Image (cartoon, grey):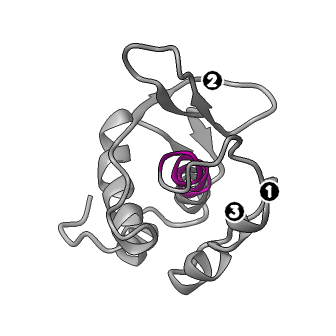
Amino acid sequence: MPRTKSLATLINHYGNEREFKLRANKISDVYRILNREIFNNRLKKPFISIKRMSGALGLFEFNPYASKNCYKIILHNRFRNFQEFVEILGHEMVHYYQKLVLKQNSAKHNKEFYSFKKKFKKIGLNLKRVYR
């Protein structure tokens, strides 16, 4: 992994041609960069897990009754490329922001969700409802 912590550097390093297999040690750096660039460091790090899923590349879970890990981001273990992983993590972080900061009852694909589209575009990412 490159020493510089720029998102563009990481995306260039991993490239867009090959499949990206997610490992737990890759999530923290990307999470920190996205939190700084898009969310102004307003998000605490939730519990993030990697799991093989069918029908989704990522999801955000909120359980108000949990004593520990009431906010969870679950990511698929394989992505088309590194950029797709970054976009999915960012997508789930928007849902987390909706719940944690905006205090919305449901973190859906609404007006507030799509208000982040410009910030994503500014750093070279796409924010959309469905990927693939």
Residue 129: assigned label = 1
- Which-is-in-front pick, marks 3 and 2? 3
Q: Earlier in the sequence, mark 2 or mark 1?
A: 2
Hey, what amino acid is under mark 1?
Arg
Residue 52: assigned label = 2
The single residue placed furthest to the left in the displayed view is 3
Magenta stretch prevailing secondary structure: helix
Hey, what amino acid is under mark 3?
Phe
Q: Earlier in the sequence, mark 1 or mark 3?
A: 3
As rendered, which of 80 and 27 lies closer to the eye?
Answer: 27
- Disc 2 to disc 1: CB gap under 8 Å: no
Q: Residue at x 79, y 60 (%)?
A: 110
The residue tagged with tag 1: helix, strand or loop? loop
Residue 57, position in %: x, y? 68, 39
Q: Label 2, label 1: how many angstroms apart (C-alpha)?
A: 20 Å
Q: Residue at x 41, y 64 (%)?
A: 34
Q: Residues within 10 Å of mark 2 (few under 14, many from 20)?
A: few
| First to last magenta residue range | 90-100
The residue tagged with tag 3: helix, strand or loop? helix
Q: Which residue is mark 3?
A: 113
> Is residue 63 positioned above or below 129 on the image?
above
- Which-is-in-front pick, marks 1 and 3? 3
Q: Earlier in the sequence, mark 3 or mark 2?
A: 2
Residue 129, position in %: x, y? 80, 56
Q: Count up the numbered dots.
A: 3
